[in-house]
Image: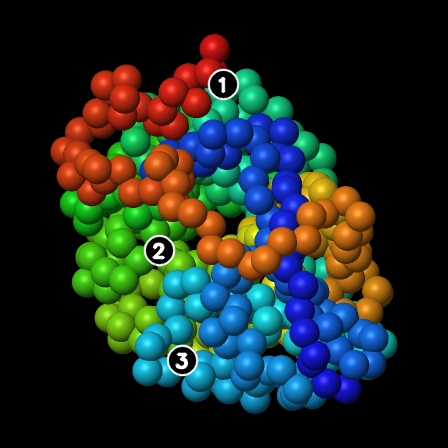
Amino acid sequence: MKVTGYRSLTTVHDWGRLIGDANGVMPEPRTDVHVLILETDSGLEGVGLGPHGDIDRVFGAVEGEDPRAVTALYDRMLDWVFKTGHSGATFGAIGAIDMALWDLKAKAANEPLWRTLGGRDRFVPGYASGLDIALDDEALVLLYERFADRGFSAAKLKGGRDLEHDLRRLEALRDVLARNSAHPALMFDANESWNRSQAVRFVTALERAVDLAWVEEPVRRWDAAGLASVRSGIRAAVATGENLTGLEQYRPLLNADAVDIVQVGNVWGFTHFLRVAAVAHGYDLPVSPVAYHANPLAHAATAVPNHLAFEVQDLSSPIGLQVDQDFEDGGIVLGDQPGLGIRVDEDRIKIVRAANPSAALAGPHVRPARAGLRLVPDLRQQDRIGGPAAEQVRS
């Protein structure tokens, strides 16, 4: 079996709500989902998810190769760009190809990927994470009640701009999840919007009223000294890693004893996750994947000894994707379909040439001008949580 080509598709996920974080809110409730299909001469096809606009830089490393040599091909892709660098969009392309290669490897064995990777139990413990900063309090409760109906007793709130606002919502979240646990786990995500002093002051104030399991990305992702400083100043654990692209970016954080929960982005692929999990395990640290559509890394989470909890952002799938998994008992239940268990209905999805998404003017992927510089919450209209789009949701 040889890799012969690829197809790129773009579909959308309909969230039924606006999503965002402390940096901004998406302008509409539908977001693009990029799908890569690797073709082989045997007729089997592998599915990878995530933006892969730089695919032509690395596809030559796998073209004509047997996809079952997936870990060797991962290193081959890294080798192809070792002079120019593999971060950013290139790492996304490598991750999407890697995901599709693992899908092919499991399909060739006619078994679900969690079996191929050595998993014993198809259940993956999770936590709810609604990307919820744009929701008013009533909508927030309704959203997490749907997660609670599926047994979730842990959840992560987006915030970091208004202490009273966040505290009120954390308490509401705790009350919703209390139906499933007397001590629900609450996490808080600031998405790199603070400096270290802000982070300690803000979290310390929250901890006077609620027990936080972890605080995520309180300062910049690469700031080992800052993360270590925050970690020493609060009770909650510090989580980070979803935006790190390569093992070398974790090393300073681990050496500085700056992280309690090692996170990995789904879009960076399986081989990256497995290697990060192994390194974290060497430090006796748990690993937690940060979700992407269809929760692909859930298969790998079954096979590592230090998986803690998997982020679940929504209970539905993107348009045109059928995913063989269910949500029960506060986690993900993986199915028995071969590979990732993702079926792609190409009649419902447009086929496009792979392209890097254009830079946005606003939203959660654009760092605000005053991020990390506010001494107190700035409640001017143009700098309020979520901006104008959030105001429309609350009205």
Query: What amino acid is found at the position of numbered circle 2 in the picture?
Result: Val
Cα–Cα span, label 1 and label 3: 44 Å
For label 1, the SS is helix
Query: What amino acid is found at the position of numbered circle 3 in the picture?
Result: Val
Q: Which residue is found at the position 24% from the left and 64% from the top?
A: 224
Cα–Cα span, label 2 and label 1: 31 Å
- Look at mark 1 in the image and give the residue it sits on: 393
- Look at mark 2 in the image and give the residue it sits on: 238
Neighbour tally class for label 2: few under 14, some 14-19, many 20 plus, Cα within 10 Å? many
Ranked by sequence position, the earlier of labels 2 and 1 is 2
Q: Which residue is found at the position 59% from the left and 58% from the top?
A: 353
The residue closer to the viewer here, 190 or 281, is 190
Marking on residue 143: none
The image quarter containing residue 99 is bottom right
Q: Position of residue 391 (x, y in %)?
A: 42, 17
Q: Position of residue 285 (x, y in %)?
A: 43, 70
Q: Position of residue 128 (x, y in %)?
A: 58, 43
Ranked by sequence position, the earlier of labels 1 and 3 is 3
Query: What amino acid is found at the position of numbered circle 1 in the picture?
Result: Val
